[in-house]
Image: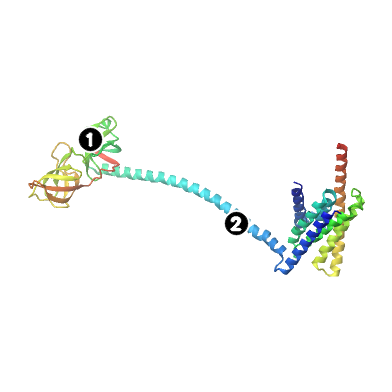
Amino acid sequence: MERKFLVSYIILILTSLLLIILDCSAGPPLGGRIYNFFSIEARQQLNRWTGYKDLEKKNKSLLKDIAKLSYEMEIYETVKRENEQLKKTLEFESNSPLDIIPCQIVNRLPEAVNVSYFISKGAFMSIEVGDPVIGFNGVFGKVLKVGNETSIVQTLMNYNVALSAVDQRSKVRGILRWHRRFYLEGVPIYADVKEGDTIVTSGKGSVFPQGLWIGKVISISMEESGYSLRIETEPFEDFTNPDVIFVIKK
Amino acid sequence: MRIFIAFFLSLLALSWRISFSDVFSIGSISFNPLILLLYFTTLYWNGWYGLFLGFLLGLLYGIFFPIPFGFYSLVFCSLSVGFLAVRRRIYKYKYSSLIILFIATFIFGVIELLVQGLSTGLFMLHLGINIIPESILTTIIGIGILYILKKMQCGLHLNY
């Protein structure tokens, strides 16, 4: 037998003996511990890993479901909003004593100061230039231009608008203008106007019928000239973000 | 590559011995794949492989029994060296050489019984119903393997 082989054999035998001595001097048998590790802990680890993989798979699936449900929820919310809007529009149209045509706001005109909108109906629906326009809460503006299927509506937030208005309580008249805020002008200093009074259309002039709500008085002050009052009015209608408006047929 | 093959074979033999020994048995008699592998690796493949395979096999086999770790390494290494020691005195391609395999299996069985600390009666009983039949069955399977090896040798000679 080769010498190298014998040396290897002796080394291996000594290693085995060393292991035996170490194992006998230590607590529980090393073999048992290794066996336990592989049979119990490794299995537990494997189960944990498998469980983790399952969870990861479930998590991915749930995330997909959440994304899908979020998308469906968004669609549902949009449909719900549209439905509510249509219901409100129909109710308003049914209850209104006026002959009104509901119109969707299509877009806002790109003007810096004055606020005007494209609406979804035009001459085909018998809309004409100058027709008064109201919103759910009050006067909105008037039709400025008419196309076949669309029109342009000029809101009250316009420097060119001058609307004859009246205090609903005291019947004091004035002209409603917009100078970055709404003011009722031309009201004499002795006129009976109080804060909180409701301002409505007077019916004078060729555009708006009488009694349409415009807004309420929020502050009263003297003009610089000292001959008339400066009555600041807050409109009931929101001109910045409308969805539906109504054109009144004359 | 050969080391991996040896390692794979040792794992196979080990799992056979530990888990499938009862499944692939004739009555209560089963063969000993560990000694079979050690014998043929040492004598017919490479003595070094046999030695280190014996050490590794012993370590792994010892895990499954409540005996000092390294004990079976000592046994398998010694058996491997024993095989090599008698190699020059026998002609390994002769069927009668398998008496070495029989003796090795028998010795290993006896050691296993001794480790279990059985009473003399039980020891003799196990010797009679387990160890001797196991040694015989292992030798019979060894005959089959030797037959295949001899055929392979003939094939190789013919090819050359």
Which residue corresponds to the image point at 62% horizontal and 56% vertical from the top-left? Answer: A47
Q: Amino acid at mark 1?
A: Val
Which of the labelled discs sits on residue A173, or is there none? none
User: Which residue is label 2 attached to?
Assistant: A48
Question: Number of labelled discs?
Answer: 2
> Which chain is disc 1 placed on?
A
In this rendered view, identify the residue nearer to me: B126 or A198.
B126
In this rendered view, identify the residue nearer to me: A181 or A71.
A181
Horizontal and vertical percent position of residue B54: 79, 56
Which corner quadrant holds the C terminus of chain A? top left
Q: Amino acid at mark 2?
A: Arg
Is residue B153 among what the camera can see?
A: yes
Vertically, is A200 above or below A22?
above
Which corner quadrant holds the N terminus of chain A? bottom right
Q: Residues within 10 Å of mark 2 (few under 14, many from 20)?
A: few
User: Which residue is label 1 attached to?
Assistant: A143
Q: Nearer the viewer, mark 1 or mark 2?
A: 2
Tell me the element at label 1: strand
- In the orientation shown, which residue stands out farthest toward the front? A3
Is residue B67 among what the camera can see?
A: no
Side (left or right) of B15 relative to A142 = right
Horizontal and vertical percent position of residue B127: 86, 63
Callout 1 touching callout 2 (CB < 8 Å): no
Horizontal and vertical percent position of residue B106: 86, 59
Tell me the element at label 2: helix
> Which chain is disc 2 placed on?
A
In this rendered view, identify the residue nearer to me: B65 or A134.
B65
Which residue corresponds to the image point at 86% horizontal and 40% vertical from the top-left? Answer: B156
Side (left or right) of A118 relative to A64 = left
Vertically, is A98 above or below B7?
above
